[in-house]
Amino acid sequence: MIALRSSAKLNLTLEILGRRPDGYHELRSVVQTISLWDEIVLRSAEAPARVSCNWPELETPDNLCLRAANLLAAEAGVGDGVHVELTKRIPLGAGLGGGSGNAAAVLIGLDELWELTLPVGTLRTLAVKLGADVPFFLTGGGAMLEGIGERIAPVDIAAGWVFVVAQGGRPVSTAAAYAAYDRRPTPSRTDHERFLRCLRDSDIDNAARMFDNVLEPAAVAVCPEIAELKNALLRQGALGAAMTGSGSAVFGAFPSEEQAVRACAALRALAPLVQVAHPTPRGVERTS
């Protein structure tokens, strides 16, 4: 038995550079894993792999945990199965990458449970097949993502921020958000070179003011609560705020734990999910 936890992530910036012939979008995004976790327990079992979850609607063949297990078994020629016990806390349709983190955790955990010791490059190749965000969660921390998310460069985001994450509206479909963006593209306001320089210089005020997500206007059209929560975070003193991923979660960065906790309390009347979160150095952690 192996127990792990997989984190959520925040897109501090998200810029779309174009659409590829295969329908994927080329992007540039600075991301950070945070202390909002799902828990995963992997137990040896006879094939086929199966999943149980505290959210029963996720107990389907399309669950990314099952897809990751089946893909790894096929790649490594493993005939065994696995029972994946998934405890979800990261909301769906939020842009927080919960499912992608789950898939990364299964790849990492089964590599150990099945005693495969596959090269990191092999796990990354499999991760790309599962989803654009999955390769990032194999390492986590802070990173610049390019391509469709498979090109990953570490970024030190030890900037001193404490985040408040909130989701108050309906889930937003990733496909719908990108389709809406394609109909009416929004130019990026982020100067990534300057943003990275601010991070290196620990200039957290100016870096936070540069948070930006080009998908935000498209998502707000579907879920107006995104804009309402973002503005509420700024009124509570956030140095900067933005939507993460394709929504509908938003985040604000605060300079201290005290200010973040106070803002979190103020926003609880507006949203069912409001949580203080801190940057984490990894996307997946072993818990036992």
Image (cartoon, rainbow, N blue to C red):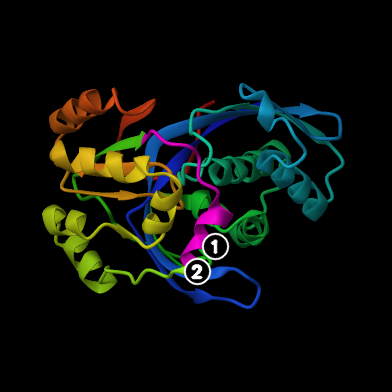
Q: CA distance from mark 1 to mark 2?
A: 6 Å
Is 181 covered by the magenta stretch? yes
Residue drawn at 17 percent across, 26 percent down = 262
User: Of the numbered discs in the image, which one, if any, rests on residue 169?
Assistant: none
In the picture, which quadrant includes the N terminus?
top right
Estimate the x, y position of residue 114 in percent, counting from the top left.
73, 39
- 270 drawn magenta: no
Compared to residue 161, the image places residue 120 above or below, namely below
Residue closest to the eye, 94 or 51: 94
Q: Which residues are magenta?
A: 167-182
Task: Judge the density around disc 2: few (<14), some (14-19), many (≥20) Cα neighbours within 10 Å.
Answer: few
Q: Are marks 1 and 2 in contact (CB under 8 Å)?
A: yes
Count of numbered marks: 2
| Tag 2: amino acid | Arg
Using the image, determine if residue 12 lies above or below residue 64. below
Position of residue 181 relative to residue 5, above or below, is below
- Left or right, 202 with reference to 35: left
- In the displayed structure image, the side of residue 154 where residue 189 appears, left or right: left
- Residue 194 lies, in percent from the top left, at 20, 70
Q: Tell me if 174 is positioned left or right of 115 in this view.
A: left
Quarter of the image holding residue 22?
Answer: bottom right
- Specify whether residue 280 is in view: no
| Image disc number at residue 183 | 2
Identify which residue is drawn at 22% across, 60% down.
Answer: 210
Residue at the disc numbered 1? 179
Which amino acid type corresponds to the residue marked 1 in the rendered image?
Answer: Ala
For the question of whether residue 252 can be seen, the reply is yes
**Which element type, helix, strand or loop, lies under badge 1?**
helix
